[in-house]
Image (cartoon, coloured by chain):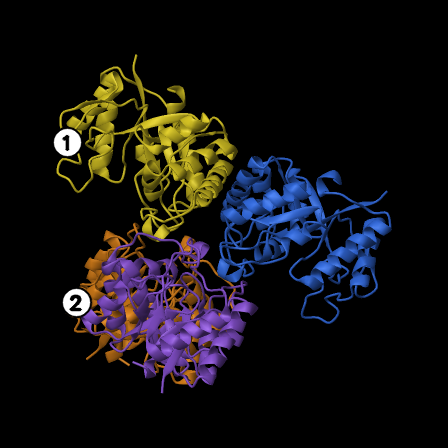
Chain colours: A blue, B yellow, C purple, D orange
Amino acid sequence: MHAIDLNSDLGESFGAYTLGMDEKLMEYITSANVACGWHAGDPLVMQKTIRAAAKNGVAVGAHPGYLDLMGFGRREIKITPEEAYTYVLYQLGALDAFTRTEGVKIQHVKPHGALYNQACKDEKLASAICRAAQAFDGELIVLAPYNSAFRTAAEAIGQPFAGEFFADRAYLPDGSLVPRSQPGAVIHDADEACRRVLQMAREGTVTCLDGTELTMRCVSVCVHGDNAEALATVKKIRCSLEQDGVLLRAMKELI
Amino acid sequence: MHAIDLNSDLGESFGAYTLGMDEKLMEYITSANVACGWHAGDPLVMQKTIRAAAKNGVAVGAHPGYLDLMGFGRREIKITPEEAYTYVLYQLGALDAFTRTEGVKIQHVKPHGALYNQACKDEKLASAICRAAQAFDGELIVLAPYNSAFRTAAEAIGQPFAGEFFADRAYLPDGSLVPRSQPGAVIHDADEACRRVLQMAREGTVTCLDGTELTMRCVSVCVHGDNAEALATVKKIRCSLEQDGVLLRAMKELI
Amino acid sequence: MHAIDLNSDLGESFGAYTLGMDEKLMEYITSANVACGWHAGDPLVMQKTIRAAAKNGVAVGAHPGYLDLMGFGRREIKITPEEAYTYVLYQLGALDAFTRTEGVKIQHVKPHGALYNQACKDEKLASAICRAAQAFDGELIVLAPYNSAFRTAAEAIGQPFAGEFFADRAYLPDGSLVPRSQPGAVIHDADEACRRVLQMAREGTVTCLDGTELTMRCVSVCVHGDNAEALATVKKIRCSLEQDGVLLRAMKELI
Amino acid sequence: MHAIDLNSDLGESFGAYTLGMDEKLMEYITSANVACGWHAGDPLVMQKTIRAAAKNGVAVGAHPGYLDLMGFGRREIKITPEEAYTYVLYQLGALDAFTRTEGVKIQHVKPHGALYNQACKDEKLASAICRAAQAFDGELIVLAPYNSAFRTAAEAIGQPFAGEFFADRAYLPDGSLVPRSQPGAVIHDADEACRRVLQMAREGTVTCLDGTELTMRCVSVCVHGDNAEALATVKKIRCSLEQDGVLLRAMKELI
């Protein structure tokens, strides 16, 4: 039997501002990456999101980002590894206050936006983030691209790692994503996205843009719930996995 | 044998800004109220402060405040009890990420500035803060004035409470502080401050501005380390307590 | 001929967060209260909003608020008049940088949320805000409730004042709004709202909840564009005014 | 007769946090770069700083930076030129509200920290900042290193430019500063700093670390007032210039 996790970013509303379709998305995913109040989210939103996750049986992960609400954590900031370490710890702790009071445990950590992208390529940054995860909880899973500095860093210190697959993005033979600026980078066809997820889930491979078949052992697929169309794709992926006998399980059960 | 705790606000530096004489103050106090990044403090400062406290054997408390760095958390903000509950939880968790990685445990929580002052008189706010403390850790001590809504709220839900005594402030017969706008509100003489602390520590009383002797059972005395003069007073209070055979112990050993 | 201004709050989006239906609303209003980056809005949003207002011939006003994005400026904060003075000045200047580069001039200032509500009753706060308006530009119109500390404060220093009428709110005989907690406080019927605007525009009166007819000389009516229903009401009010021969003019032409 | 301007960063205090020795520094400099509330400074500090500058006859410049108080604007952030344009405009306007009410005019703009350093090498960023300066005021002087993208960008659109000389930093033959990581990068001897300023003021040259004599036409020298030692150096530079007959004038009189 094959099994896979579906993860998505949630809890990104802030004060009077609403973002995402969290309640509906909760019905289809198995793991939620919850914003921790820096790039998005606030304490009331965090509490509400954790409660909804607990109610829906969705596993909770921390989604720490830069203190850049205006840029939604998407802009690169040059920080030191020591800063990254303390920033991730701070946000892990803040989220933990809400999970412990709701009787759940933080399953994983997946950095957000620019922090995620920078650390994928920056060993020192990736190492700082993995060390923060370990200092916080030795069982905390680091969720990140299979081919990234995160995996190397997590394995180097023996911290659990989960590879993350992007259903709607084309891959290069080195395992990195085709940059959005290039043609064919984004897979717009939901059926094609489903086929790719199934192939990855069953065979542990992805067919690259140039036709190369690449090993890609990911236990989790990243999906989005920004709008109705995105939600429809998530629903389709979930149905397609269930029809093909792929079990949907939170990543902690898969590694 | 009498024993007492000396608490002080620490970790209030932020980024390039330095505030307080934390390192020196650590030598004299037994409990530190550590800012949690909202009204003051940042992750690097929090880590450094927790490390220094651990090294000096000073017990650590959370010092949550309003998200008002510009006003240093000293300006009243009208928030709902639910907001207060989540704001305190968030900051408790954030601080906890640093205490757990340094092998210590948060001993107490003492709200900062306007949040503290408002909740002293506002039962709903005090209750929300005490409930947050309890949700986070049933053994977390709420540190606040002996005669305040905090004590009532903590006792109502069975959360540990520690009364806090102000060495340099005159009291009214109802147990509240003489407002700073009134003559005699502040005790500037360090010797007089020492005498008051000793009386409170040994007899559990305070002599009010009008001469009334009032019961005041506080296990902790609040001291300040903002400048050299304040530091000298703390040193004097500590010496005076030791000379008179009053033991200095963190509040968790006293309640 | 009677004439009136329709004002609305705009430019309240922030970073990745969108709020309001600014583009559509611009077609119906004559004055826009533009958020200045403290309670809402950011520099890109401000620039975009000013450009859209200039293009639609809508007069621009500053909508300064508290530095409380998490509370959307709706929570009371106890600040000093001096703080209020500098906070309003800061935001006026920030907005002015965008109006001057688009070739328009700030017509008016209308504080936002809690700052507005507090100053309506607090003479010192209202005075500080009016003095900031005057220091910035002696012709800047202060837009606020007809019966409020704002009018007294503006008149005391000879700063232009424009009364603002709420089409969808019931009034008490003292000219203040019926609190939202009381029955009948909000007028949900769009036709009834239109009738009230027409009466105010033509006769300068409002019929209070208890039947009292009250003098109410406002040159501007506050409308909302938060959602499709609100937008429909604005459209209806505008049509109804035009059909009855009431001219729609920016407030600077009316005082 | 030779003449030169001495500029320094001021108004970098924030809320309860004090930074710099502004009042004393004001006695020696001719131009102040005033923080605008993003990387440092707040409205009360801005008002106080502008008042002190006006009183001391010190010309005022805007010192816009990143919205990164925690990093004091010293960390690189990858922003778009359009963002830079609006961020600089916003801060120029905010500062202008305080200069106009104190009867002075913003003389120049000098970006702060990482924004300054990034734009020195990034033509698009430098161009966006110069265009913001021009949109705000066609006479506003851009103050930046003589050999930098700022000069090219300012000259390309005909905006006034003033070169800035660093008295305590060694130069490379291409006109850039020797990186701080290299030996000899910082000139610690105050007398040597004075000699270099005099040479630059009188001959328009600087002797590079490798002995090369380089043309360096700067009208302003950057000095620091962070502590007593820095202040002593500023005093020494000023005295030395006066003794050698170099006039001290605000940069607007020199270009």
Location of residue D89 by image quarter: bottom left
Q: Residue at x 30, y 29 (%)?
A: B147
Label 1: state its secondary structure.
loop
Q: Is residue C163 above or below residue D181?
A: below
Q: Position of residue B93 (x, y in %)?
A: 50, 39
Q: Is residue A242 left or right of residue B24?
A: right
Q: Position of residue B50 (x, y in %)?
A: 43, 35
Q: Residue at x 68, y 46 (%)?
A: A31
User: Looking at the image, can residue D148 be seen?
Assistant: no
The chain to which mark 2 is attached is D
- For label 1, the residue is B189
Label 2: state its secondary structure.
helix
Q: Is residue D45 above or below residue A136?
A: below
The CA distance from mark 1 to mark 2 is: 39 Å
Q: Quadrant of the C terminus of chain B?
A: top left
Q: Are marks 1 and 2 in contact (CB under 8 Å)?
A: no
Residue projecting furthest to the top: B1
Residue projecting furthest to the front: C211
Q: Position of residue A165 (x, y in %)?
A: 73, 53
Of the residues shown, which amino acid type is indicated by label 2?
Answer: Lys
Q: Is residue D86 left or right of residue C231?
A: left
Disc 2 residue crowd, few under 14, some 14–19, many 20+, Cα 10 Å: few
Q: Is residue D231 left or right of residue C180?
A: left
Q: Position of residue B49 (x, y in %)?
A: 40, 37
Of the residues shown, which amino acid type is indicated by label 1?
Answer: Asp
Instruction: Identify which residue, A141 or A147, lies in the foreground.
Output: A141
- For label 2, the residue is D55
